[in-house]
Image: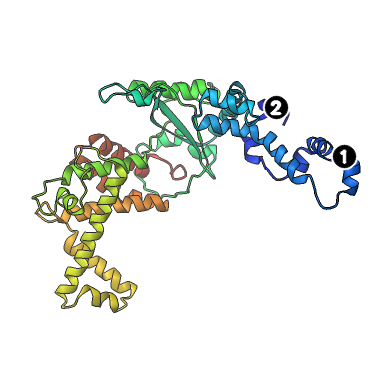
Amino acid sequence: MKGLANINPDYIDKWDMTDWKTQASFILKILHSAVESKWQHRINTSKSPDQLCNIVLQQLFFASEFGIFLWATGVSHQTIDACHHCGLSPCYQSVLDSVKSLGDGCMDIVRSITDGPHIFSYDNVNMSTSNFIEQRGSHTLSKVTSGTLGIVYKIPNAHLEDVLLAPILARMRDASLHGLRFERIAEFCPLRVSTTEEASIHGNLLYHDEIYLNLLRKTSENISLYAIRLIFQIGIGLFHLCLNLCWALLSIYHGTTEQKGSLQYFFALLGKSRLSGEKPDYHTLLAAFMQILDGLTLNGLQTLCEHEGSTLASFLNSNPSPMDLLQKAMDILYEFATPLPQHFPAETIDEDDGIQELTMAIRDGDFGRIKDILPQLAMTFRAASGNNYCTEILHLIINLKYVWTPVFV
């Protein structure tokens, strides 16, 4: 490496702390000469300076990466300069130059990805800009900068002819239905954070222009400026779908502690005291839903065993076969998870099962299962007055069935 300007994403990926003889043979010879003379090298048979030279060399090579680590973890300007005087890190300005060089290299990678088929997603981000967080009062406005963070995903095994816009527009009135294919998408590249907020239609349009025209430097040769809105085939954020689905179920089935079978009733039984708000913590709420579903399922299995004149323990000790377990699951669905006229608890177990199916399908990367429950999800959001998500899911269903070409899907 000739200098800090040569630090780029490729250098970081290939950086290795073991093969010093190949990466820095000249510096290694200088260190050996400084530590041990030729005469000492001839007579010294019990000790070797290799370990000491490797430690010094590692410190020299590690300094630039360690400086970036200090900056990324929020270490102050003064501390980085103090580490620089101790020989542990470059100075603060050199670290900033390295970060900028890395960022420019990452943007070059993103530009090459966006020349082909890709997925573009983004969401709002809030960054604290106060150096005195402990001095914020309970009624003091926090010093926060709001913006948008975008991520570009590279689509594996896709070609430009697979994502042509003209066939998609031509299929607007084609009612043929084709199957779905799904592949995991592992490679992704975050973009630079923008201070443009995407909380409105105008903000979304400005962010699209900023990313593709300014940051990614696309021109009329790459994309049609007249079709810059049409090139976006809208999908749905699966995490936000799960998040808002949990909140929607909470708003529908919350009830009161006195209503046996309501969510609030089960929250009281489980000792959940922080789930009564309009939008509680997602992970805590999802865990509570899964506990309720497991309890209701186990109670349903116990009730079926009692109706058959046996007990749950005897059924488990009988070593049931997979077919026996499947039949019990079908009986539980029919007896306890089928909507009935009363509001609780039949629909509660049915909807909790829906959120479990959605989260497990996302975890397994099975988009076909997600596609199968999209109509039920749309109806659930409509019942919870979640009109935006209901409309978005309906548009996604129409695109999957009629608009998008089979290869694009």
Question: Which residue is rendered at x = 68% and y = 28% of the image?
Answer: 6
Per the image, label 1 sits on a secondary structure element best described as: loop
Vertical arrangement, residue 114 with respect to residue 272, above or below: above
The quadrant in which residue 111 appears is top right
- Looking at the image, residue 283 sits to the left or right of residue 118; the answer is left
- Looking at the image, residue 158 sits to the left or right of residue 275; the answer is right
Depth order, front residue of 52/143: 52
Vertical arrangement, residue 44 with respect to residue 118, above or below: below
Question: Which residue is rendered at x = 49% and y = 24% of the image?
Answer: 212
Residue 179 in view here: no
Depth order, front residue of 183/270: 270
Vertical arrangement, residue 207 with respect to residue 377, above or below: above
- Mark 1 is surrounded, within 10 Å at the Cα level, by few (under 14), some (14 to 19) or many (20 or more) other residues, namely few
How many labels were placed on the picture?
2
Q: Amino acid at mark 2?
A: Gly
- Mark 2 is surrounded, within 10 Å at the Cα level, by few (under 14), some (14 to 19) or many (20 or more) other residues, namely few
Horizontal and vertical percent for residue 34? 82, 35
- Give the quadrant of the N terminus: top right
- Residue that label 2 marks: 3
The quadrant in which residue 393 appears is top left
Picture disc at residue 381 = none
Residue 80 in view here: yes
How far apart are labels 2 and 1 at the CA level? 30 Å
Q: Amino acid at mark 1?
A: Ser
- Give the quadrant of the C terminus: top left
Please report whichever mark, 2 or 1, sits nearer to the chain's N-terminal start: 2
Horizontal and vertical percent for residue 218? 53, 23
Picture disc at residue 37 = 1
